[in-house]
Image (spheres, grey):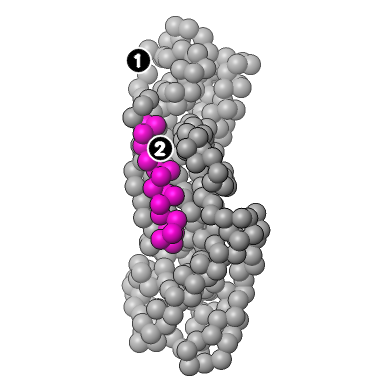
Amino acid sequence: MTRIAVNPVSLPLPDGPAFSMDLELLRTFVEVYRCRHFGKAADRLYITQSAVSARIRQLENMLGCQLLLRERKQVHPTADGERFLPHAENLLKQWERVRRDMTESAQGGPSLRIGATPALWEAKVLDWLERFQRNHSSLRVRAASRDTQLLMPRLVEGALDLVLQFDPPRTEGVEHRVLGRLNLVLASAQPETSLADALGEAYVAVDWGGGFAAFQAELVERFTLTLDTAQLALGWLRRRGGAAYLPQEIAARENLFPVAGAPEFSREIHAVWRTPEEQRDLIEKFLQVAAESGKAQ
């Protein structure tokens, strides 16, 4: 994939000379303006609050005016801040259009760029992508597997069209939809494993996110092995035996044995996008395939 440098770029203001500006400064200002809080903006941008403050100071120094007033725990835009907002939003939109146009030109046409966590790729998304490509074999798809804190910034900056994750987005200015659920069951490599044995020394923890971690803590007193993905857990169970919480479909496909009496855990799958209008049709087609796949299972 052709990568285009984004920092810095030359941005002309209507009544002033061109100057060099980091696009991240613009994104940070727009996010603070929207939520009126430095801490919330930091969460939504997946950076630290001190980084947000530093970026706003740098932007104000470059423009030679104060954009935001800090009053106790709230932030309010100044008159200059209100005036600058539409310029910042327009410049970010223009850059997204430029980036997409140049990328598509280099690669020979439209594409769909999808990001998801490793756990979701294994459990659901790879199957959805396979079904999608059966009906859209000529469309180029680029897939990215990252943690959520790495995926969302790429979506915001326009490097991804669609992100699939477990939690609702914290970022403003994105659309999202609950696409389905991931059902996790406690499965064992050995038949007729008791619940006590399954949750004992042979238990293997799999990282299914923060919500699952709290659920797991109430069930298991102590475990010594945590694995990032379902595939690692499957490999371990084949080699050493034991039990782990795995997606229901994977446990059945791999002929693992459900542990009687074990509580199940379910997580929502959220589709998140922030994209130019011309990509909406492709995104909707992919989401439709995913929804139909869930009904068929």
Above or below 160: residue 223 = above
Badge number at residue 44: none
Residue 16, position as x, y percentages in the image: 52, 92
For the record, the magenta segment spans: 274-294
Q: Are marks 1 and 2 in contact (CB under 8 Å)?
A: no
Q: Quadrant of residue 221?
A: top left
Q: Please check the rendered image and state whether residue 278 is part of the magenta-colored stretch, yes or no.
A: yes
167 on left or right of 54: left
Along the viewing direction, whichever of 34 and 194 lies nearer the viewer: 34
Q: Which residue is mark 1?
A: 261
Give neighbour class at mark 1: few <14, some 14-19, many 20+ (Cα, 10 Å). few
Residue 150, position as x, y percentages in the image: 54, 52
Give neighbour class at mark 2: few <14, some 14-19, many 20+ (Cα, 10 Å). many
Q: Say what secondary structure mark 2 lies in.
A: helix
Along the viewing direction, whichever of 219 and 174 lies nearer the viewer: 174
Identified at 38% across, 85% down, the residue is 83
For badge 1, the amino acid type reads Gly
Q: Is residue 241 visible?
A: yes
Where's the C terminus, which quadrant?
top left
Q: Quadrant of residue 180?
A: top left
Q: Earlier in the sequence, mark 1 or mark 2?
A: 1
Q: Which residue is mark 2?
A: 290
